[in-house]
Each structure stands twice: as structure tokens, then as C-alpha cells.
Amino acid sequence: MREDNGVGAENRLKPLVKWAGGKSQLLGQYSSLFPVCFNTYHEIMAGGLAVFWHLAPRLTGAHISDNNPELINFYCTVRDQPEELFTSLARHRNEKKYYYTMRSLDPASLSPLERASRFLYLNKAGYNGLWRVNSRGVHNVPFGRYSRLSFPSLPDLLAASHYLKKTHIRQADFASVLDYARQGDFVYIDPPYHPLSASASFTAYSGSFGEEEQARLAEICRELDARGVQFMLSNSDTALIKILYRGFDLQQVTARRAINSKGDGRGSVKELVVRNYC
Ligand SMILES: C[S@@+](CC[C@H](N)C(=O)[O-])C[C@H]1O[C@@H](n2cnc3c(N)ncnc32)[C@H](O)[C@@H]1O
């Protein structure tokens, strides 16, 4: 399937990576919470981009960003070289020794295509789809022991490429949204969640996202609000989040989540959606 005009491409849009905190399971509850109309769409903590892929066929313009350099290089490669990426993915092996060899490579020594291919391989073959790096930025997720690897098909990559070609993609801190968002735009924000308890703290992302970062993000949201930009933010239902976003519309949604610190128990958890519009 060639996606020259986008016809049919929307049927193939879904996250290309497994990502901690991915929002696919919440799209049904979110659909009535998106704004009725807006100009440009911004997603400033991209991860697996579940919301972007859901909205993409209806968007007139979009900006996506994340501070993870490997993730952003991956999306740029999907946009620019979907066929070459597909060919490269087929060469990977689902073997422990091979996995650790790939993991040990320095991304800086690779071409953008090789980096993107290694990124998706480690994401699919590593434990639980985690992307975790140590304090020196070195990937340290163990081999996942899956019976098979599920890479995107070529039509999936071509459909994603079609929409990414119409999208500004950048590696950036979330605060850079203030350089791009204009009155009438819509910003969706899905940060690492504020932990429900100290023992539930889960740092799957490079760097830490503690209470200071949550407060810095809330300041950015207040600035977006002052500029007439609509925002919608997902986070956990905690006292801190309710205080930081006091005065905005708060809606509860129900998510299936790991419910203990080991992540091996599953249950329903109430989460919040914060909006500056109704
Ligand atoms: C919960 S995930 C987003 C999941 C995504 N909505 C999905 O559907 O898969 C949070 C993302 O925030 C990114 N992030 C963490 N700190 C950031 C920062 N200071 N600036 C930009 N992105 C950041 C992480 O790299 C991660 O991809």
C-alpha cells in the first residue's frame, strides 16, 4: 500500500512503540474530552503518541516533541525512511546474546537509520517495552524473552510516515511549547505521573520527574491558559495535582494500571484529566 493521498492511512494508525503510560486504553474515555475545534495540535511529551495517532487524520497541523533523543530520531526516521527502516528491522534476531550486543552499541556511532532500528528492536525485545537509561544515559533494560517480536508492518510504517511528513518533530523540553503554541491551538500533555505513594514511584524515563518538575509543568499550563491556548493534561489523582491545577476543570477517568511497586498486580485506578476549557 502506498500512501500518496492518505486514503486508508488512518485505519493503520496506532502506536509504533510500546511505551510506559501509553494512552491507547483511555482513548474511548478521552474522546468526549477533546476540544470541539482548534487550530494546530501540539503533543509535548510524545512517548508512543496514542492521542496523536488517534487525532492525526483530522489535524490541519501538528507539532510533536519529547526530550528523549532516541525516540525523536525514531519518529524522524519513520517519516523519512519507512521502507529502509522496515528492511533493517527484518534483520534483527530475537536472541539474548544478540540483544545484549545491540544494547551495548553507542547510538552516537550509528547512522540515524541504524539508531532508529536499534531503538525499536530494544523496545520490542527488551523487558516490558521499557526504555530506561542509567545516569550516564546508557540503556539498561534486560532481555524480554518474548516468543516473537512484533514489529510494525510496511503499510503501518508508510501510513505513519504519511502523517509525520505533515508534522513538526523536535527533541525538546516541554517548556519549548511556549515558543510554538498560538491562541486557538490545542496542547495535549501526558507527563510521567505523580506517584500515588512514595513506594509506587516509577522512573521509567531518563532523568527524574519529581514534584518540582510537576510544578514547573503546571506553570507552563497556566501560561498557555493566559495566552488563550487550550490544554488537556493527564495525571494521577493525587492531592498535589489537584492543588497545582486548582481552578481548572478536573475529570476522573478509570485506567487499568499496575497497582503495586513490583508492577505485577493489576487493577483499576482513577486518574485525572485537567482542562482549561469545557
Ligand atoms: C507518560 S509518557 C507519554 C506517553 C504517551 N502519551 C503515549 O501515549 O505513549 C511521558 C513522556 O514524557 C517524556 N518526558 C519526560 N520529561 C520530559 C521533559 N522534561 N520534556 C519533554 N518530555 C519529557 C518522556 O520521555 C516520555 O516519553
Image (tube, grey):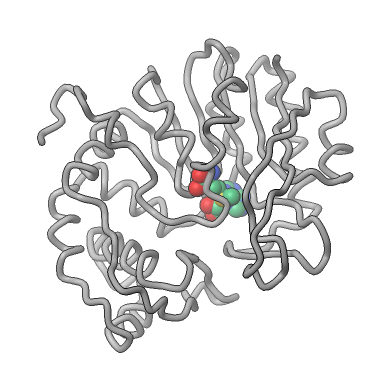
* Depicted 156 relative to depicted 85: above or below: above
Q: Nearer the viewer, residue 51 or 189?
A: 51
Q: Which residue occupies 24% across, 65% down?
A: 114
Please identify the residue farthest to the bottom as the structure is shown.
97
Report the residue at 33% width, 53% height from top.
74
- Asked whether residue 172 appears in the rendered view, the answer is no
Q: Assign the C terminus to one quadrant of the image.
A: top right
Q: The N terminus lies in which quarter of the figure?
A: top left
Within the image, what quadrant is residue 210 found in? bottom right
User: Residue 188: image x %, image y %?
Assistant: 58, 32
In the rendered structure, the answer to whether residue 157 lies left or right of residue 264 reads: left
In the image, 239: left or right of 156?
A: right
Question: What is the tally of numbered marks visible in this picture?
Answer: 0
Q: Residue at x 24, y 33 (%)?
A: 162
Which of these two is toward me, 255 or 89?
Answer: 255
Check the image and report above or below for 175 versus 149: above
> Where 259 falls versus 273 (above or below)?
below
Q: Position of residue 250 (x, y in %)?
A: 78, 28
Report the side of 41 relative to 183 (left or right): left
Residue 183 visible? The answer is yes
Picture residue at 69% right of the left edge, 49% below the top: 268
Locate residue 195 relative to residue 240 in the image: left or right. left
Comparing 47 with 257, the one in front is 257
The quadrant holding residue 201 is bottom right
Residue 79: % across, % down: 26, 42
Residue 60: percent from the left, percent from the top?
A: 38, 17
